[in-house]
């Protein structure tokens, strides 16, 4: 018997309520109810962004190729923060939440989506507040092309979703793997294009770095912020194909890890 439209809609409502409840549970567990509580969830990335901005301001490096270094760093650091938040706290999430799986309606996907959606929302609110404050004070210019700006942000979020799911599975299958996640995050930093423009590299290096999916996220994001001021290089079909395969592999991996989680 095929499910009716009403039953499918009812199922989606149940999953949405599960994810909403799990998000609130994560917030309470991480930040508690005292003082400003979950507001730290938004303030934390803002404080880190302010720190990075101050370091580059006092370094005396105001511009490179006619562009403010602070603007270049912010357009790289904020998407980087989104990626790190979606792939860092996800390690061993299944093991930590194993008791919840005895509730019939809670699945591994609910656990992952709740955590990743929470991280995405926190980083996005921080982005809006921080950029809004800088534009209002005149510290930076306004966004030149909002569609590319939003597209670049969501591209990084999609890649973070797939990467977070894979990291959750890998760290569930191997405790040793968890120790390699932070070092790999740092190794990824100079290779991802976070603090450099592809156009600044020699042709051979440009060809090589374009295989990294994060480069396309940063370049599209900067295309939205700088507009035509800076030449940008990106290949959206390549990014979509790469991340789609990565997402498919992540869904299969999460589905197959459940027997190990419940052992």
Image (cartoon, grey):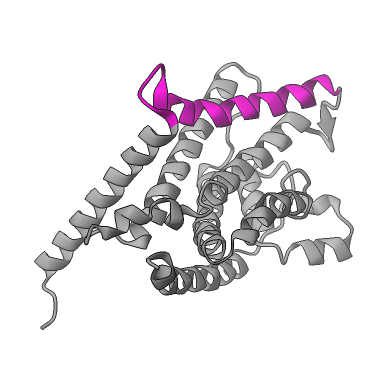
Q: Residue 192 or 249: which is nearer the viewer?
A: 249
- In this view, the residue in front, 206 or 177, is 177
Please check the rendered image and state whether residue 3 is part of the magenta-colored stretch, yes or no.
Answer: no
Q: Is residue 35 magenta?
A: yes
Image quadrant of residue 11?
bottom left
Give me the residue at 72% from left, 36% from top. Answer: 73
Q: Quadrant of residue 171?
A: bottom right
Residue 250 visible? The answer is yes
- Decide if residue 195 is on the left or right side of residue 256: right
> Where 45 sits versus 99, above or below?
above
258 up-or-down from 198: above or below: below
Give the dominant element type of the magenta stretch: helix, strand or loop: helix
Asked if 28 appears above or below 115 in the picture, the reply is above
Region in magenta: 31-59
In the image, residue 88 sits, relative to residue 225, either above or below, namely below
Residue 212 locus on image (x, y percent) = 70, 62
Asked whether residue 226 is in view, the answer is no
Horizontal relation, residue 173 to residue 51: left or right: left
Q: Position of residue 250 (x, y in %)?
A: 49, 68
Residue beneath the point at 39% across and 27% down: 32
Q: Residue at x 78, y 46 (%)?
A: 196
- Residue 154, given in percent of the width and then of the height, sits at 50, 51
Quadrant in the rendering for residue 258: bottom left
Q: Residue furthest front?
A: 263
Give how far across and how far down residue 103 sits, in percent. Answer: 23, 57
Judging depth in this view, the residue of 164 and 70 nearest the camera is: 164
Residue plotted at (10% across, 65% down): 6
In this picture, residue 193 sits left or right of residue 240: right
């Amino acid at each position: 018997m095929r499910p009716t439209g009403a039953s499918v809609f009812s199922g989606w409502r149940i999953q949405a309520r599960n994810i909403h409840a799990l998000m609130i549970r994560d917030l309470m567990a991480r930040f508690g109810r005292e003082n400003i509580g979950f507001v730290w969830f938004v303030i934390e990335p803002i404080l880190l962004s302010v720190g990075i901005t101050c370091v580059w301001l006092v370094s005396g490096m105001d511009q490179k190729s006619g562009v403010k270094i602070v603007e270049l760093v912010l357009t790289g650091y904020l998407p980087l923060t989104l990626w790190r938040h979606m792939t860092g706290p996800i390690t061993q999430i299944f093991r930590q939440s194993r008791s919840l799986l005895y509730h019939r309606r809670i699945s591994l996907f609910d656990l992952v989506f709740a955590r990743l959606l929470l991280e995405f929302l926190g980083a996005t609110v921080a982005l809006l507040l921080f950029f809004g404050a800088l534009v209002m004070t005149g510290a930076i210019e306004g966004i030149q092309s909002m569609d590319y700006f939003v597209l670049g942000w969501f591209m990084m979020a999609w890649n973070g979703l797939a990467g977070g799911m894979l990291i959750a599975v890998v760290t569930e299958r191997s405790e040793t793997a968890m120790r390699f996640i932070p070092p790999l995050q740092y190794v990824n930093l100079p290779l991802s294009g976070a603090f450099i423009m592809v156009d600044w590299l020699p042709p051979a290096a440009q060809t090589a770095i374009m295989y990294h999916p994060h480069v396309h996220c940063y370049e599209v994001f900067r295309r939205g912020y700088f507009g035509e001021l800076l030449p940008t290089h990106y290949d959206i079909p390549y990014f979509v194909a790469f991340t789609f395969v990565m997402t498919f592999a992540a869904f299969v991996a999460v589905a197959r890890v459940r027997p190990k989680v419940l052992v």
